[in-house]
Image: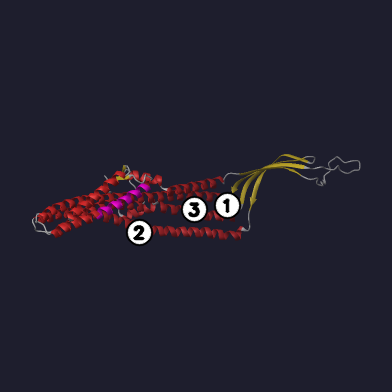
């Protein structure tokens, strides 16, 4: 009766799996390189970072354009009332009474053009360009840092998908063996060669494995959906990660070399250095108000007041000097603000320096540990497989209990799963070490 129930459950599970397979989406083989490329092209945060970079580039262009002259043009035509115009200069058109003839003005027109080219502005323009250039480079480095974080998240998701598929494959194979064991035990129990209790133990283990398979398949569905969403694919696309290079781990530098590489290559650290350079330029720019400003000026004026005045070809060229004496006692606060910003960034660099060393130290030893785990679990697989073979032989010769056999089977399954997980975790740890150290975070062509 128990065997029939178990067989019915197996048939129902198989039918459900076949039905879900019929409704599954198209399959797609996926390498890690393809996954990274798709993730970068589909990520919204990168688009925001690119927009910030373009904004910083435009500000740099704006700062450079301040070196060019300012040119303004204005013109006007106005209708006016009948003003009282009393010219003190004789016009030569006196009437018989010795007075001047009345002047009637009812409109006027004028136009002017002015240009000013700065020659010296207290180094404000030069330092403004320097600051904008540093901020542009910082924005580019921030965008690169965002890109590296997205790559690392993609790598982790890729190997999470592999681990989920490996778990399903191993548990499914173990379930097949459990079904065969229950089938053999049933025949032995029917012939009186096996205790009923041992058959029930085997059936119970089969049920537990079926539950484990359902859990593994659920994890696989979630990992596959998340990966589809990350890559911008259809949600029902069945991904098959290509892990042909799963065990190809490269040697890494020693920790001191990795720390030095991080401080010279990590984009977030280099971005802070550029921000410090921008702050230093900002201090010099804020000190510009202590100096006078000198510029070449030029202009043209034309005016026409019918019946009174006409001016043409009035061109002027000269030097203009301006100096705000109030800046001698007002500008100090602005300079202090700029210095305070530099102090904040300097403290941030020191804090990041310590954080980088901690991250490199942790990632370095995590990687070494993950590599050692591969060797340990490889031996564990061999030991668990050999142990199962021995216990199985003993059980067939009535020298081991059914509990011993089932425990050996569980240990073998766990060893295989842990070995596959260890290989995936080692690859993630290797890429993580590359990310935090500023070295190659994603090897070109790596799988």
Element under label 1?
loop
For marks 2 and 3, give the one nearer the viewer. 2
Q: Which mark is residue 278?
A: 3
Whichever of callouts 3 and 1 sits on the residue coming sooner in the sequence is: 1
**As drawn, is 33 to the left or to the right of 408?**
right
| Magenta residues, start to end | 211-229
The residue at which mark 2 appears reads as 358
Q: Quadrant of the N terminus?
A: bottom left
Please state the horizontal and vertical placement of residue 21, each as a whole percent of the image: 28, 45
**As drawn, is 361 to the left or to the right of 373?**
right
For marks 3 and 1, give the one nearer the viewer. 3
Few, some or many residues within 10 Å of mark 2 (<14, 14–19, 20+): some
Few, some or many residues within 10 Å of mark 3 (<14, 14–19, 20+): many
Element under label 2?
helix
The residue at which mark 1 appears reads as 122
* Disc 3 and disc 1 in contact, CB within 8 angstroms: no
**Residue at image x 53%, y 60%?**
336
Element under label 3?
helix
Farthest front residue? 1
Check residue 341 for magenta coloring. Answer: no
Please state the horizontal and vertical placement of residue 223, each as a whole percent of the image: 32, 50
**Label 3 – label 1 distance at C-alpha:** 17 Å
Farthest left residue? 397
User: Principal SS element in the magenta part?
Assistant: helix
**Label 1 – label 2 distance at C-alpha:** 44 Å
Of residues 262 and 159, the one drawn nearer to the viewer in this rendering: 159
């Amino acid at each position: 009766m128990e065997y029939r129930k178990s067989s019915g459950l197996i048939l129902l599970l198989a039918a459900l799996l076949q039905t879900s397979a019929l409704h599954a989406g198209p399959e797609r083989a996926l390498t890690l390189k393809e996954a990274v490329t798709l993730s970068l092209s589909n990520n919204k945060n990168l688009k925001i970072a690119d927009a910030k970079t373009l904004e910083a580039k435009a500000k740099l262009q704006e700062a450079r354009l301040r070196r060019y002259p300012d040119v303004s043009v204005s013109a006007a035509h106005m209708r006016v009332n009948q003003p009282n115009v009393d010219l003190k200069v004789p016009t030569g058109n006196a009437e018989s009474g010795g007075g001047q003839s009345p002047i009637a003005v009812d409109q006027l027109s004028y136009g002017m053009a002015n240009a000013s080219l700065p020659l010296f502005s207290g180094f404000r323009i030069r330092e403004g360009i320097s600051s904008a250039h540093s901020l542009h480079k910082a924005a580019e480095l921030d965008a690169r840092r965002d890109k590296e974080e997205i790559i690392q998240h993609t790598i982790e998701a890729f190997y999470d998908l592999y681990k989920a598929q490996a778990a399903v494959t191993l548990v499914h194979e173990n379930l097949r063996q459990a079904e065969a064991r229950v089938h053999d035990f049933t025949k032995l129990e029917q012939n009186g060669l096996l205790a009923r209790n041992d058959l029930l133990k085997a059936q119970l283990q089969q049920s537990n494995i079926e539950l484990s398979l359902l859990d593994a398949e659920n994890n696989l569905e979630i990992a596959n959906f998340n990966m589809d969403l990350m890559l911008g694919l259809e949600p029902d696309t069945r991904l098959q990660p290509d892990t042909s290079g799963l065990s190809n781990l490269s040697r890494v530098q020693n920790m001191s070399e990795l720390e030095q590489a991080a401080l010279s290559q990590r984009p977030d650290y280099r971005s802070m250095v550029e921000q410090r350079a921008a702050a230093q330029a900002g201090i010099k720019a804020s000190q510009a108000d202590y100096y006078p400003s000198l510029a070449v000026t030029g202009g043209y004026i034309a005016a026409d007041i019918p019946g009174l005045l006409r001016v043409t070809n009035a061109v002027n060229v000269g030097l203009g000097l301006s100096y705000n004496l109030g800046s001698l006692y007002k500008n100090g606060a602005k300079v202090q603000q700029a210095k305070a910003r530099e102090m904040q960034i300097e403290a941030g660099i020191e804090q990041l320096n310590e954080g980088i060393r901690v991250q490199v130290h942790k990632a370095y030893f995590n990687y070494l540990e993950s590599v050692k785990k591969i060797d340990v679990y490889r031996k564990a697989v061999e030991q668990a497989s050999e142990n199962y073979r021995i216990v199985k032989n003993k059980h067939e010769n009535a020298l081991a209990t059914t509990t011993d056999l089932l425990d050996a089977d569980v240990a073998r399954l766990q060893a295989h799963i842990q070995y596959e997980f260890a290989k995936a975790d080692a690859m993630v740890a290797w890429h993580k070490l590359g990310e935090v150290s500023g070295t190659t975070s994603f090897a070109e062509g790596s799988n």
